Image (cartoon, helix red, strand yellow):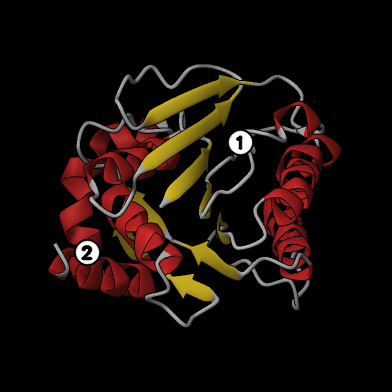
Amino acid sequence: MRVLITGATGMIGSGVLIECLESDFVESVLIVGRRSCGKQHPKITEILHRDFLDFSPLERELTGLDACFYCLGVKVGMMREANYRRITVEYAAALGAILVRRSPGLAMCFLSGEGVDPTRPSRLMWVRVKGEAEQLMSTLPFERLHIFRPGYIHPEKGVRPSYFIYQFSDLFYPLLRLLMPRWVCTTSQIGRAMIAAALGKSDRQILSSRDIVQLSAAMEACR
């Protein structure tokens, strides 16, 4: 497969990238980001691109891709809703629009989050906006769409944690996995599950943490 990854400098995206580099099913990885992911590998082609509302300069590079692992995200913090919507919805819309034209056979694996449901109103801003992004993705004519809604995500294989609390993840992750297994997965499992979904090994459009773990295990068995 020829794979596009966005958000490869983030915790989840970097974990997905590691799995792509280790997978025999992934022939090449195109990374598009505002800053370098810092990795060099024969599979990697990296493009630094500033305007995520306009991907027209990259039409040639975005042609003939088999899958997009959309892991681009931003910490909510004190961010205003308009800014969060621009990054979460409008960036996805701009990239999705060009991908359906230039790579019509593409499988989109879109990273969302636990608790997101476009059919239900929420008081949480990030949940509402992520729901809008999911709804947008569902309107685009991808060959296949898989929306990933993980809960707690444990970083593996040297992936740098995205929040300070993750510095203590090695202490409480075993407990979470024991007490709340349906809400927990790892960066490695997300990466393997995205590869499996892109290969057509899942008929689910929405994947929870439990689905991600199961699909990852099935992919691991194929090695």
**Image quadrant where residue 91 sits:** top right
Q: Residue at x 52, y 42 (%)?
A: 4
The residue nearer to you, when weighing 147 against 121, is 147
Examine the rendering and report whether any part of residue 181 can be seen. no
The answer to whether 182 is drawn above or below residue 102 in the figure is below
Q: Secondary structure at mark 1?
A: loop
Residue type at mark 2 is Arg
Horizontal side, residue 142 vs residue 38: left or right = right
Q: Residue at x 44, y 61 (%)?
A: 150
10 Å crowding of disc 2: few (<14), some (14-19), many (20+): some
Pick the quarter of the image with the C terminus: bottom left
The answer to whether 117 is drawn above or below residue 61 in the figure is below
Q: Residue at x 50, y 63 (%)?
A: 148
The answer to whether 42 is drawn above or below residue 176 in the figure is above
The residue nearer to you, when weighing 110 against 31, is 31
Q: Mark 2 sits on what residue?
A: 177
How far is disc 2 from disc 1 in space, using C-alphas? Answer: 25 Å
The residue nearer to you, when weighing 27 against 116, is 27
Please state the horizontal and vertical placement of residue 191, each as a whole percent of the image: 35, 52
Q: Mark 1 sits on what residue?
A: 74
Please state the horizontal and vertical placement of residue 71, each as a whole percent of the image: 53, 45
Q: Residue at x 24, y 67 (%)?
A: 219
Residue type at mark 1 is Val
Examine the rendering and report whether any part of residue 35 can be seen. yes
Q: Secondary structure at mark 2?
A: helix
**Image quadrant where residue 147 sits:** bottom right
Horizontal side, residue 130 vs residue 53: left or right = left
The residue nearer to you, when weighing 191 against 31, is 31
2 vs 1, front mark:
1
